[in-house]
Amino acid sequence: MFTMFTTTAMQLDFDSWLSSFDWSRPSWDMLVVAFIIFGGLVYGMSLGRARLALTTVAIYMSMAIVSAAPFVDKMFAAKVNFVGYAFDIKIVAFLGLLLVVIFFFARGALFRSFLGGDSAGGFIQSLLLSFIHSGLVVSIVMNYLPTEALANFSPQIRNLFYGEWQLFYWLCAPVAVMLIFSVKKKT
């Protein structure tokens, strides 16, 4: 995967994609990039490693519950109309449930047990996890979007966040980062 970012063709494609942004008319791509940057900087600096680990659990739980809930597709077959597109109710259910789970975790014993150790954590790990969390949330939301709404995103954004393999990589990334830093810490 890392060799993909070092190739000249990929670099030229990324440069042309980056220069194609029209800052006077924000696009969905710009919204995604801004969310990743904001999520990585503000979110990562405001939370410590323990809270980010807890947020990882909340993201996984919310996605699992929304994906497995049979009533989400059946009872809420009507679509939510937003900015001219019919968005699947799964997006609203996922984001709402994520906020609820994070709120209850923050008030519960599980949160206090995570904070029993080093709550500040490493700055690099916290920053990396916050960027990955932002990317994971974008990937989950994009995979819940109807295919006609995906046409609003550039091929670069779709290739990075949309698809079964992309979602799989984004789901594995927080676990990999936590494992790498936990092994590094023990040595």
Image (tube, rainbow, N blue to C red):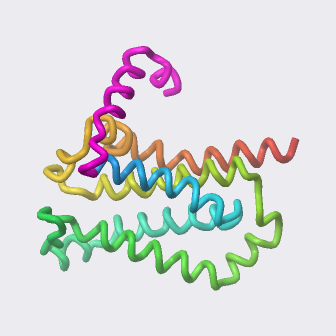
Establish if 66 lies above or below 145: below
Q: What stretch is highlighted in magenta?
A: 1-27
Is residue 27 shown to the viewer in this render? no
Q: Which of 52 and 163 is in front in this view?
A: 52
The residue at the far top in this view is: 8
Give the quarter of the figure containing the C terminus.
Answer: top right
Horizontal arrangement in the rendering, residue 43 relative to residue 64 (left or right)? right
Q: Would you say residue 12 sits in the magenta stretch? A: yes
Residue name at image x 34 percent, y 24 percent: 13
Please name the residue shown 68% across and 76% down the image.
Answer: 111
The quarter of the picture where residue 162 lies is top left
Residue 7 location (% of width, % of height): 45, 16
Quadrant housing residue 173:
top right
Name the residue rendered at 70%, 60% in the picture.
Answer: 49
Return the x and y of residue 182 as percentages of the image width and height. 76, 48
In the drawing, does residue 108 fall left or right of residue 72?
A: right
Main SS, magenta residues: helix
In this orientation, which residue lies closer to the viewer: 8 or 107?
Answer: 8
Query: Does 165 appear above or below 138?
Result: above
Residue 22 among those drawn in magenta:
yes
Q: Which of 119 and 75 is in front in this view?
A: 119
- Which residue is found at the position 13% from the left and 51% from the top? 148
The picture places residue 175, in percent across and down from the top left corner, at 60, 50
Q: Residue furthest right?
A: 187
Task: Using the rendered image of the protein, determine whether residue 155 is visible from the camera's viewpoint.
Answer: yes
User: Number of callouts in the render?
Assistant: 0
